[in-house]
C-alpha cells in the first residue's frame, strides 16, 4: 500500500481508545469488582449478555454478533489477536502501526475498497494516524 501518513501525538487531549478484553477482566478481578465497575461503558451490553446466559464466557460474547458489536461500541476490544498495519510511504519509508481489532476491520475495508473515500484516520498507541491511500 502506498500513501502518505501523518502521525500526531495526543498530548493532553483525552482520546477514547479500545480496552482489550483480557487486560480489562484481569484489572476487574485484581480489584475484586465487576468489569462494569471498572469500565462503566460496558454495563449495558454485559447486562444484556447476562440475561441470555447467567455465567457468560468470552466465547459467548464474541459468538453473539449484537453483543460483540455493542461491547466494541463501548470501547472494549473483543479481538484476542494483536494487529498491525504496515505501510510503505511515498519515498520508500515504512511504518508499522499497532491497531485494535475493530480498527483492523475498518482499515481492511478502506484499503480494499475501490471508492474515492481513500483517506482514513485511526488511533495507534498514543497517536492518531491519518493515511491518504491515493
Image (tube, rainbow, N blue to C red):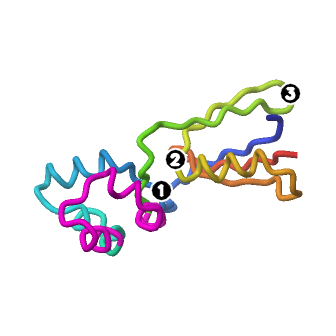
Question: What's the CA distance linking mark 1 and mark 3?
Answer: 31 Å
| 107 w.r.t. 53: above or below | above
Q: For numbered disc 1, what is the local secondary structure?
A: loop
- In this view, the mark in front (1 or 3): 1
Mark 1 and mark 2 residues within 8 Å of each other at the beta carbon: yes
Q: Nearer the viewer, residue 85 or 50?
A: 50
Q: Which of marks 1 and 3 is nearer the N terminus?
A: 1
**Residue that badge 1 annotates:** 17
The residue pinned by badge 3 equals 91
| Residue 106 at x, y percent in the picture | 65, 53
Horizontal side of 46 relative to 92 (left or right) equals: left
**Residue sitting at 31 percent across and 51 percent down?**
58
Of pointers 2 and 3, the one earlier in the residue sequence: 3
Q: In which quarter of the image is the N terminus?
A: top right
Secondary structure at numbered mark 3: loop
Q: Distance between the residues labelled 1 and 2?
A: 9 Å
Main SS of residues in magenta: helix
Question: Between residues 39 and 58, which one lies in front from this camera angle?
Answer: 58
Any magenta on residue 64? yes
- The boundaries of the magenta stretch are 45-74
Q: How crowded is mark 2: few (under 14 residues within 10 Å), some or many (20 or more)?
A: many
Residue 112: quarter of image: top right
**What is the x, y in percent for residue 7?**
67, 45
Few, some or many C-alpha atoms within 10 Å of disc 3 (few <14, some 14-19, many ≥20)?
few
Local secondary structure at mark 2: loop
Q: In this view, does 93 lie to the left or right of 8?
A: right
Amino acid at each position: 500500500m502506498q500513501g502518505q501518513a501523518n502521525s500526531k501525538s495526543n498530548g493532553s487531549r483525552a482520546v477514547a481508545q479500545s480496552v482489550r478484553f483480557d487486560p480489562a477482566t484481569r484489572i476487574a478481578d485484581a480489584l475484586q469488582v465487576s468489569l462494569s465497575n471498572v469500565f462503566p461503558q460496558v454495563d449495558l451490553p454485559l447486562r444484556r449478555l447476562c440475561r441470555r446466559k447467567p455465567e457468560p464466557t468470552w466465547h459467548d460474547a464474541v459468538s453473539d454478533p449484537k453483543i460483540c458489536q455493542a461491547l466494541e461500541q463501548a470501547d472494549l476490544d473483543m479481538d484476542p489477536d494483536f494487529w498491525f498495519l504496515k505501510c510503505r510511504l511515498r519515498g520508500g519509508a515504512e511504518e508499522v502501526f499497532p491497531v485494535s481489532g475493530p480498527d483492523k476491520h475498518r482499515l481492511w475495508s478502506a484499503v480494499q475498497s475501490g471508492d474515492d473515500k481513500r483517506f482514513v484516520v485511526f488511533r495507534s498507541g498514543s497517536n492518531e494516524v491519518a493515511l491518504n491511500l491515493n
